């Protein structure tokens, strides 16, 4: 069958329907100086001529050096972990080196098997029945989870979702951007100022109809929420529970499948801590798991294991009727994922570390954070922000302006933390600090000593 | 030629309706199940839900496609065919009896007049086949 594009008559009819004279008029909102040479509009003036490979390499090398080699105590959604050299050596082999989950799926048995192993690992970490083959990142993953919860909650017709302010501020903004035009509202729940968590006793007795409650774990402050009480509260009001997790923390903590009486319903999160470098913020990947009952509402690709005519095991994309190439406009999502390479690295990373290795990384990160917190809060003018247990991040309050302190630390080649001033002004001079397994005693000592000097000098001054 | 029982009423979107007083039973036609192929999952409405005529009320998923089922008339769902949860293939083998999807309490008996009879539906199905 030949490919038949729109006829002139089709185009005319469509333009008339929206009241536009010609196709070019659809691009009027793009300033002329940004448009490519077309008719009498000027060419792109700000794009320079091409450069030789050698010149490009020099520029990039120079810019990479500007990053320096600071000691990084910033987490806030992207975490520095040791990635064994073998992970990316294997990931970038020709057999694996593709960004995409397969289109000619069954021809790619190796890739399918890897994705199947990935799903198995994710389902095991989260305590859920099923996992998909990944999403774009943690933030858009929350948006997909919200859309999924609204579709899946058949007891509630509500399009209202309760989201604690302890959820990552970027995730909340991203999710809101994606779901608000579908008439879904994200309603904030405020947190306890002492604990840095959602106090179950503060939850409304008559919350009204809502489709789901989001539970971040650990939350943005690093704090561990009272997940059992929150889960049971949401379920008792006919709502689903969406867990937003750091998958590494789950190697140590109670998996969402075990929360409360019935467990969380949907789990999403950022996969970066599992073998993906911080790389100035991406590419990362999102994870998503759920209970079996909701699998048909899950977005993304799912790989299944089956047998061929001879009874030999094989892997295949399954439940594709949810997806856009079959379900068209009624698909659960238009995502296929192009994060396949990140997932490949993650799967190899987890396979190399094993369950025990992951647990040790998580435990060492927690121990280092405890050591950091003790050292920092022994300085006059530095206090712990919250009194609840936390994973590998914590809030500290400073008696000096945070921007000044962070700038002074940076001068000592230390990235001292993430300022909470913009998103949580009520916390005053508060920063979020993180220590993973990569921050040894010497790094922590150097940070504490530098901070001590800053406070000493401030007192003298 | 597919089976089109004379005692039932039909829609252009391939649902059938069996009328019993103010209760109606709804399913998909033999022609529809044949087009869709082997059923793997049927998503049924919740008992107690009310629909207007033309509302999406169920999804039938086959190895080839997932299709919406539209409510032929307005009413409240009184019963769903739970057997289809474990045996969706019943819709293929017995679309007019054991393969029924759900029952509704009819809101407006007058809407039944707007449905197709077996002859008219046979015409629709035959046009479809070309």
Image: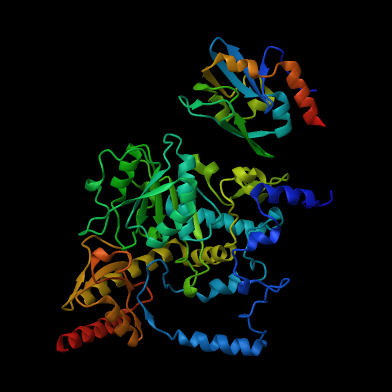
* Residue projecting furthest to the right: A1
Q: Position of residue A76 (x, y in %)?
A: 37, 67
Q: Is residue A193 left or right of residue A276?
A: left
Above or below, B104 against A436 in this view is above
Q: Tell me if I can see residue A317 in this picture.
A: no
Q: Position of residue A195 (x, y in %)?
A: 22, 58
Residue at horizontal 52%, vertical 76%? Answer: A85
Q: Position of residue B5 (x, y in %)?
A: 71, 15
Q: Tell me if I can see residue A308 in this picture.
A: yes
Residue at horizontal 73%, vertical 44%? Answer: A309
Q: Is residue B53 left or right of residue A157?
A: right
Above or below, A92 against A313 in this view is below
Above or below, B81 against B20 in this view is below
Which quadrant, please, contains the C terminus of chain A?
bottom left
* Residue projecting furthest to the top: B21
Residue at horizontal 19%, vertical 71%? Answer: A383
Residue at horizontal 54%, vertical 20%? Answer: B103
Q: Is residue B24 left or right of residue A407?
A: right
Quarter holding residue A431: bottom left
Q: What colour scheme does the image use?
A: rainbow
């Amino acid at each position: 069958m030949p490919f038949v594009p729109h006829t002139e008559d089709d185009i005319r009819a469509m333009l008339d329907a929206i009241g536009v004279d010609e196709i070019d008029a659809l691009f009027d909102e793009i300033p002329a100086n940004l448009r490519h040479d077309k008719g009498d509009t000027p060419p792109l003036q700000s794009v320079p001529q091409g450069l030789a490979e050698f010149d490009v390499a020099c520029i990039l090398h120079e810019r990479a050096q500007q990053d320096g080699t600071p000691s990084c105590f910033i987490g806030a959604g992207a975490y520095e972990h040791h990635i064994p050299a073998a992970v990316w050596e294997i990931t970038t082999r020709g057999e694996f080196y593709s960004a995409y989950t397969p289109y000619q799926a069954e021809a790619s048995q190796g890739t399918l098997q890897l994705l199947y192993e990935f799903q198995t690992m994710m389902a095991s970490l989260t305590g859920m029945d099923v996992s998909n083959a990944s999403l774009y990142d943690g933030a858009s993953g929350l948006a997909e989870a919200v859309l999924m919860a609204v579709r899946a909650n058949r007891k509630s017709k509500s399009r209202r979702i309760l989201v604690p302010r302890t959820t990552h501020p970027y995730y909340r903004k991203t999710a809101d951007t994606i779901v608000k035009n579908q008439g879904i509202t994200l309603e904030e729940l405020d947190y306890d100022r002492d604990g840095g968590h959602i106090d179950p006793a503060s939850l409304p007795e008559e919350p009204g109809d809502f489709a789901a409650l989001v539970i971040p774990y650990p939350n943005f402050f690093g704090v561990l929420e009272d997940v059992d009480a929150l889960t049971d509260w949401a379920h008792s009001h006919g709502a689903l529970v969406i867990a937003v997790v750091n998958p590494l923390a789950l190697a140590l903590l109670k998996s969402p499948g075990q929360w409360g009486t019935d467990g969380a319903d949907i789990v999403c999160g950022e996969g970066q801590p599992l073998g993906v470098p911080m790389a100035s913020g991406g590419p990362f990947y999102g994870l998503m798991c759920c209970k079996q009952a909701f699998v048909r509402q899950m977005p993304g690709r799912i790989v299944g294991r089956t047998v061929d005519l001879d009874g030999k095991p094989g892997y295949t994309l399954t439940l594709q009727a949810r997806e856009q190439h079959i379900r068209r406009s009624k698909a659960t999502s238009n995502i296929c994922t192009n994060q396949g390479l990140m997932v490949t690295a993650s799967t190899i990373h987890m396979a190399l570390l094993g369950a025990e290795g992951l647990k040790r990384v998580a435990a060492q990160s927690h121990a280092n954070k405890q050591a950091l917190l003790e050292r920092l809060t022994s300085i006059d003018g530095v206090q712990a922000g919250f009194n609840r247990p936390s994973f590998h991040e914590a809030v500290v309050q400073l008696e000096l302006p945070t921007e000044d302190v962070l700038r002074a630390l940076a001068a000592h080649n230390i990235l001292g933390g993430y300022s909470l001033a913009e998103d949580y002004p009520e916390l005053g001079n508060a920063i979020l600090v993180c220590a993973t397994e990569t921050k040894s005693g010497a790094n922590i000592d150097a940070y504490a000593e530098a901070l001590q000097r800053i406070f000493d000098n401030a007192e003298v001054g | 030629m597919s089976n089109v029982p004379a005692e039932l009423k039909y829609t252009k979107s391939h649902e059938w309706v069996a009328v019993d007083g103010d209760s109606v039973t709804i399913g998909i036609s033999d022609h529809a199940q044949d087009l869709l192929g082997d059923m793997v999952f049927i998503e049924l409405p919740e008992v107690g839900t009310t629909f207007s005529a033309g509302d999406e009320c169920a999804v039938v998923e086959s190895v080839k496609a997932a299709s919406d089922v539209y409510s032929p008339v307005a009413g409240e769902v009184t019963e769903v065919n739970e057997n289809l949860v474990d045996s969706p293939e019943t819709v293929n083998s017995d679309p007019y009896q054991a393969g029924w999807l759900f029952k509704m309490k009819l809101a407006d008996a007058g809407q039944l007049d707007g449905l197709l009879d077996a002859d008219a539906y046979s015409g629709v199905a035959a046009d479809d086949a070309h």
